[in-house]
Amino acid sequence: MPSIEKMMDEVFRSGKFSHGKQVGQLEAELARYTGARHVIGVNSGTDALVLLLRAAGLRPGDGVLVPAYSFFATASAVVLAGGVPEFVDIDPETYAMDPAALEAAVGPRSRFVMPVHLFHTMADLTAIGAIARRRGLTVVEDSAEAIGMRRAGVHAGLHGAGGVLSFFPTKTLGAIGDAGAVLTDDPEVADTIRALRHHGRAGSTLNDFRAISTETTLPGVNSKMDDLQAAVLLAKLPLLERQIVRRAELAEAYTARLADVPGILRLPRTTAKGPDALERDVYYVYLIETERRDELVAHLERLGIGTEVYYPVPLAHQPAFARPGHEPGGFPHAERAARHAVALPFHPDLGLGELDRVCDAVRSFHTKTRTAA
Ligand SMILES: *Cc1c(COP(=O)(O)O)cnc(C)c1O
């Protein structure tokens, strides 16, 4: 297995840093890994979402149903593609779009539904797919966090018109900067994205600016992937399955140690994790919900333990997306998660000793505040 250094050195020696050999190799390896017919490397997961929505036929003003609780880019990508985000409350178990809430939220302008797979598990695509078929909605998936996750043996992102991957450094498969990809089985969607990522001209090389300037009819963007990022990802991809197993072991260890701590409201529910499982969850982060979340975060910070609050404000209440009708109380499960959820330290190199220390600190916080109360 070639090292990251060796793979990067090949790029330096080739002198071709954008849209070159390593990007093509990575696209082929990711197609093999995910089972997608087409993988198109782009500059980020966010760009992948914008280009996917455009290529899947979004027209200006189209409504795109998205969960009220996700990363900012889920909703901003809809706006950047020309659409209007329409927010749907989440299922408290999966943190993904709740199918019953989706049914109620479909409106006259709705043309797309974009479920998001967050943290360690996937949206209920069977129920969402059935509603989408009945209501004439195109399904695209924000699977930016979901590399390795599967339902019915099908990788995340391939249950509708297409999905995305993000290789932001903190993601399950991380680059050393920004990178992303679109996954799709649809050849027309794939061709359109290959054109859109390169000013509107598929198959172009870097020296093609004359052709771009004289023959292009579809104004695209510049969202190519760097070959240095592709080289790093090519070196890391063969380690991914082993890391996914390790992530599952660490999640299990957390759950075993935290199961009886008073004051913890919710621990993640683990489903199938084996490499051959048709239904497979992958732990991207380990997220708990607790009554006094902000105090716990401060307590852990004093002990030098870093946490991350995913996501502190529901999308529907953020300044960029707030609208009349988005009043507090309208998305109760999203609001509850925003108030109580916190991710504990989690990465495949985390040692059990470190994990024990985190669990002891979480336990002592909850027992002490209990006694004091
Ligand atoms: C990370 C992420 C994105 C955006 O990916 P970038 O590569 O950071 O642009 C979009 N949606 C979700 C749910 C994410 O976690």
Image (cartoon, helix red, strand yellow):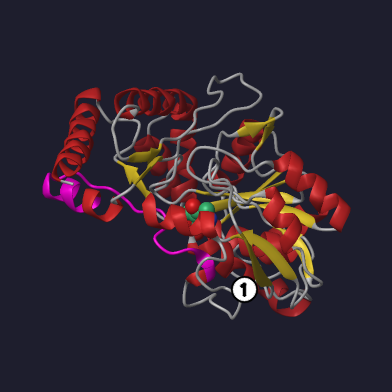
Q: Residue flagged by tag 1: what amino acid is it?
A: Val
Look at the image and give the residue range highlighted in magenta: 297-316
Under circle 1, the secondary element is helix
> Is residue 52 shown left or right of residue 290?
right
Disc 1 packing (10 Å; few <14; some 14–19; many ≥20): many
- Residue at 74% x, 78% y is 61
Given residues 227 and 291, the one toward you in this image is 291
Q: Is residue 68 visible?
A: yes
Q: Position of residue 5 (x, y in %)?
A: 34, 38
Q: Where is residue 130 in the image (x, y as percent from the top left)?
A: 82, 45
Judge: label 1 CB < 8 Å from ligand 1: no
Q: In the orientation shown, which residue stands out farthest toward the front?
A: 373
Q: In this view, does 162 lie above or below 34?
A: below
Given residues 222 and 332, the one toward you in this image is 332
- Residue at 66% x, 68% y is 86
Q: Position of residue 283 (x, y in %)?
A: 46, 34
> Is residue 314 shown left or right of residue 152?
left
How many numbered circles are shown? 1
Q: Is residue 256 above or below residue 301?
A: above
- Residue at 48% x, 63% y is 314
Q: Looking at the rendering, which quadrant does residue 336 occupy?
A: bottom left
Q: Is residue 266 above or below residue 324?
A: above
Indicate yes or no whether the magenta region holds residue 156.
no
Q: Position of residue 326 (x, y in %)?
A: 57, 73
The residue wearing badge 1 is 79
> Is residue 355 shown left or right of residue 39?
left
Q: In which quarter of the image is the N terminus?
A: top left
Q: Is residue 18 visible?
A: no
Secondary structure mostly seen in the magenta stretch: loop
Q: Is residue 238 above or below residue 192?
A: above
